[in-house]
Amino acid sequence: MTSYIRSCATRFGYAIAIALALIAAGSAPTTQAHAEERVITRIDQNVDASGYIVSFDLNGAVETRLLRLVNPDRVAIDFIDALPAVEVVSPPDNAFVDTVRHGLAAADRYRFIYRLKRDAVGSIERQERSGGEIVTLKIGPGGSAAPSSAPVADAAPEPSQDPPSPRRDIDADRELTIVIDPGHGGVDNGAVSKSGTYEKEINLAAAFSLRDALLTHPKVRVVLTRESDVFIPLDERAAIGRREQAHLFVSIHADSIRAAALRGATVYTLSENASDELSRQIAANENAADRFAGAQWQGGAPDVVDILVDLTRRETVSFSEHFAASLVRDLARNDVRLIKNPKRSAGFQVLKAPDVPSVLVEMGFLSNREDEKLLTDAAWRADVSAAIADAIVGFFRGEEAARAAGTE
């Protein structure tokens, strides 16, 4: 458990690691160091004559900050060095609050933003309880002026549809471990084109190409989930990423679908609900690989505390989403053909390691003749691999962020 928490600290920041340590410690006495990091364990919403009321249960005292945001009008509350470990649901019907959005506002601040239906003010009340504290935010009648001591921000940004950028330390000299997963293999051929091209062979060739491209960068370590034509179950592929404490897990595929005209690359991230029908079909195809797994591969998930997994997975998914968006931009910059809406999501089993940022890259479709020609072309694979490798290293070492800042 200690190495697991340490790996989380390395990838996601100290706040997550301490929260995991608190949970793992169970009933053990809380040390002074642990007391600095907090978790929101429950959120209750109510409506009464005074307005909208939301209460946050925490496992200890936490610093908060109340803000009034304008254009549009919103009330926000920041929790310093605290993270939610519960689902955030929409507000019940009320006269003052329309919607709630939430996310990391900074490396050490988690923010809830309540969009207002009408002029209202917010106030905070605190109450000690056994083993923690309850922070209550009340939003009710008031003028357009901000509540006392609450900063006002003009057109302050809300969390976007993409999740907030997770905490990650930028270090140009950091050593990276990248796990590449060539999809399918052995008795599982994957897709097979009309001309007889096997997806498992394309995936392995592309994985070797990506490995070679990554190794041209200094301080990059690459591990492949398979280096030959062997079958590896999906859970074992994800487990390899965890054992290697990978900074990133990249699964390589070249699927086949009924729409033969569809072509181009796609970058997928994990989601319980598929973003569209195509993503659902692709995920179903890839997840079906485990139909080849024998009894020796059957077993349950690792015995990990549910709340610990939830905390870590939230940060992991956020990180994966931002990397996927960055990768799509870099592929487009390098003139790699992409399908419409190339950043998609679905419930891919191979991406479900809770503590390893993961993406699945469909390089193209073997069901499309033009894509098949490219996928079987070593020079094309090398060019695409170089673009992906540059995107990976640039994202982790801050080059992508620097480019984005220079173009905005």
Image (cartoon, rainbow, N blue to C red):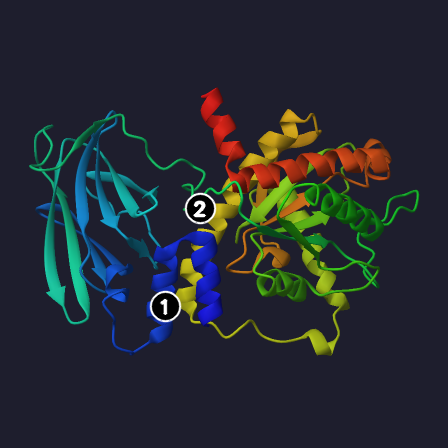
Residue 220 in the image: above or below residue 98: below
Q: Which residue is mark 2?
A: 168
Residue at (61, 31) in percent of width and height: 330
Does the rendering let one see residue 387?
A: yes
Residue 255 in the image: above or below residue 312: above
Q: Please give left or right for residue 130 compared with residue 24 in the image.
A: left
Residue at (69, 74) in percent of width and height: 297
The percent coordinates of residue 348 (x first, y second) are: 62, 54
Query: Looking at this view, is 272 or 245 the one in front?
Result: 245
Residue furthest right in the image: 195
Query: Looking at this view, is 33 or 117 the one in front?
Result: 33
Look at label 2 and name its amino acid.
Answer: Arg
Q: Which residue is mark 1?
A: 21
- Residue 399's tag is none
The percent coordinates of residue 183 (x first, y second) are: 74, 54
Residue at (68, 58) in percent of width and height: 287
Residue 189 in the image: above or below residue 300: above
